[in-house]
Image: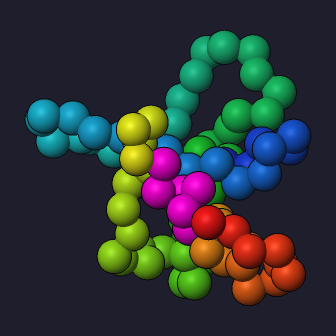
Amino acid sequence: PYHTYVPSFGDWGFIMASRLPLEVRPFHTTLSVRYLDEAVVDAMFDFPKDSDNPGGLLPNRLDQPALLDYYLADWSKWSREKIR
């Protein structure tokens, strides 16, 4: 897994998968970029201890929006309104 901070959306996480082993190589580009550099790419693979591999969570899918269920369950702690 990796993640990055998108200013208009917050912290976004991603999963990289392959049927073959993935080779980790140092970041290098010949493109003229202002944001992406080796330090930014390295930081994408670092997670705080309180969010690293929480375990027991379901993947979020279009047909099973687990993220919505987690959000609603957590929001119910703060909301006076009954949700679901």
Residue at 57%, 84% (x, y): give it: 50
The answer to which quarter of the image holds residue 36 is: top right
Query: Closer to the camera, 54 or 34?
Result: 54
- Res. 33 in view: yes
Residue 44 x, y percent position in the rendering = 58, 52
Residue at 44%, 36% (x, y): give it: 62
Looking at the image, residue 54 sits to the left or right of residue 34; the answer is left
Residue at 75%, 15% (x, y): give it: 32
* Stretch of the chain drawn in magenta: 65-70
Looking at the image, residue 63 sits to the left or right of residue 4; the answer is left
Query: Closer to the camera, 57 or 12?
Result: 57
Q: Is residue 53 above or below residue 42?
A: below
Looking at the image, residue 5 sits to the left or right of residue 30; the answer is right
The answer to which quarter of the image holds residue 59 is: bottom left
Residue at 61%, 15% (x, y): give it: 30
Query: Closer to the camera, 39 or 54?
Result: 54
Looking at the image, residue 8 sits to the left or right of residue 21; the answer is right
Assess whether residue 66 is covered by the magenta stretch: yes
